[in-house]
Image: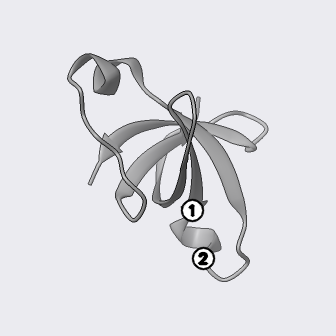
């Protein structure tokens, strides 16, 4: 996984998946799917639409992992 990028949660999906939009692609409307990192599940950190988060991207850039809530 690459370094983290800031994103905004657009939609909460079933199974702890979230649709997020990267801050750098704000105008293009590009979204990706991200799942919740294990430590965030362990500590019961809630993520709701509208939250700003840090996302680690997969090598192909289509999926990610939410590692921090800002």
Q: Is residue 48 left or right of residue 61?
A: left
Q: Residue furthest right?
A: 60
The residue positioned farthest toward the front in the image shown:
14
* Residue 27 image offset from top left, x and y in percent: 66, 83
Q: Nearer the viewer, residue 57 or 31?
A: 31
Q: Quadrant of residue 46?
A: top left
**Residue bearing the label numbered 2:** 26
Q: CA distance from mark 2 to mark 1?
A: 6 Å
- Label 2: how many residues lie within 10 Å, few (<14), some (14-19) or many (20+)? few
Which of the image's four quarters has the C terminus?
bottom left
Indicate the secondary structure of the residue bearing disc 1. strand
- In percent of width and height, residue 23 lies at 52, 69
Work out which quarter of the rendered image holds the N terminus and state it. top right
Marks 2 and 1 close (CB-CB < 8 Å): yes
Circle 1 sits on which residue? 22
| Residue lying furthest left | 43
Image height of 51 relative to 43, above or below: below
């Amino acid at each position: 996984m690459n370094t983290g990028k800031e994103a905004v949660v657009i939609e909460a999906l079933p199974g702890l998946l979230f649709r997020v939009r990267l801050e750098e692609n704000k105008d293009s409307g590009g979204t990706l799917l991200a799942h919740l990192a294990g430590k965030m599940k362990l500590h019961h950190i809630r993520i709701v639409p509208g939250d700003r988060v840090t996302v680690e991207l997969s090598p192909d850039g289509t999926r990610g992992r939410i590692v921090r809530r800002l």
